[in-house]
Image: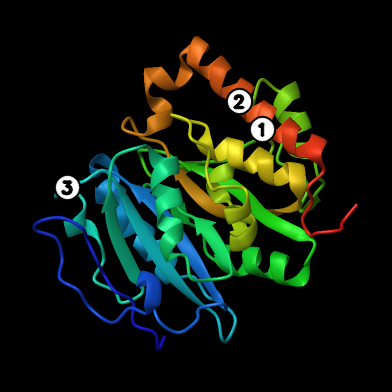
Amino acid sequence: MAQAYERIADGPGQPARAGQQGPGGRPPGGGHRRVVVVTAVHAPSARFLAEAYASLRTQELPGGWDWHWVIQQDGEGPGVASYVPADERVTFRQGRAGGPGVARTMALAHADGAYVKVLDADDQLAPGALARDLAALEENPDIGWATSRVLDLLPDGSTAGFDGDPAGGPVERGAVLAHWRANDYRAPVHPATLFVRRDLLLALGGWMALPASEDTGLLLALNAVSRGWFSSGVGLRYRKWPGQVTSQAAHTDTAERDTRMAVVEARARALEHFRWRHPVGSA
């Protein structure tokens, strides 16, 4: 790929710069035909970046398309930078700690492509994931976002799937909220696999300002305003390990969980009420 990206860290003892940047701190070259892969990372999960990177390097995109990996550290300090790949297609930044949703939203300042793909630091893309997501949105202008099938990646290296995945194809507006509400706040598709039009993501304000479930909140908001897509092919290996946020006791605290779910639902229903739609003018 011809474009050179700047590998940057803010703070002492971080990697030196490589490459050039254009106006506003973005990589040069315009970047419309580009998928921006956004990763939030903190020190405990940094050791998994090498495997995430390996899964990204195997992705194949159509001719004329490329990817740019934006890694945003949630917090400052030296615990992450040494794990960041020395690749001109990678941008690394640090910032004040605020949780993964804040880190991903901050990373959007460097999202220079038409599409944004989520890849958590401890997860791995499955072969063909980016190409399938891209094809779904390029071939269907009325589709705003895509998700895909997930396999849990267990500590012994084995994988386990889920029962009840939807059929592959379009996800109608409101379907995710209805399923989520009827199934104890479990969405039918996984927000960790999200692939989304950058402009639509920005219009909705990025990820929700919540201590957890910020990705579910975004997913429900997206589904309130736009049809989506589900790929029945495996798109992600979702690592299960003791250090992940969703395994912590605070994540399942009943009072906090009920509060998070109330805000998530209220946002989605407000968007439905105001009838803002993507694409503009759709029924």
- How packed is label 2: few (under 14 Cα within 10 Å), some, or many (20 or more)? some
From the viewer's perspective, tell me whether residue 62 is left or right of residue 58.
right
Task: Identify the mark at residue 79; answer none if there is no mark.
Answer: 3
Is 208 or 121 nearer to us in this picture? 208
- Side (left or right) of 157 relative to 232: left
- Marks 2 and 3: which is nearer the front? 2
SS for tag 1? helix
Q: Is residue 218 above or below residue 69?
A: above
Q: Is there CB contact under 8 Å for labels 2 and 1?
A: yes
- Please identify the residue farthest to the bottom as the structure is shown: 2
Q: Residues within 10 Å of mark 1 (few under 14, many from 20)?
A: some
Residue 228 appears left or right of 251: right
User: Circle 3 — which element?
Assistant: loop
Q: Residues within 10 Å of mark 3 (few under 14, many from 20)?
A: some
Question: Foreground residue, 248 or 240?
Answer: 248
Q: Is residue 113 above or below residue 252?
A: below
Residue lying furthest top in this view? 255
**Looking at numbered disc 1 in the image, what kind of residue is underneath it?**
Arg
Residue 123 appears left or right of 168? left
Circle 1 residue: 267
**Residue at mark 2:** 263
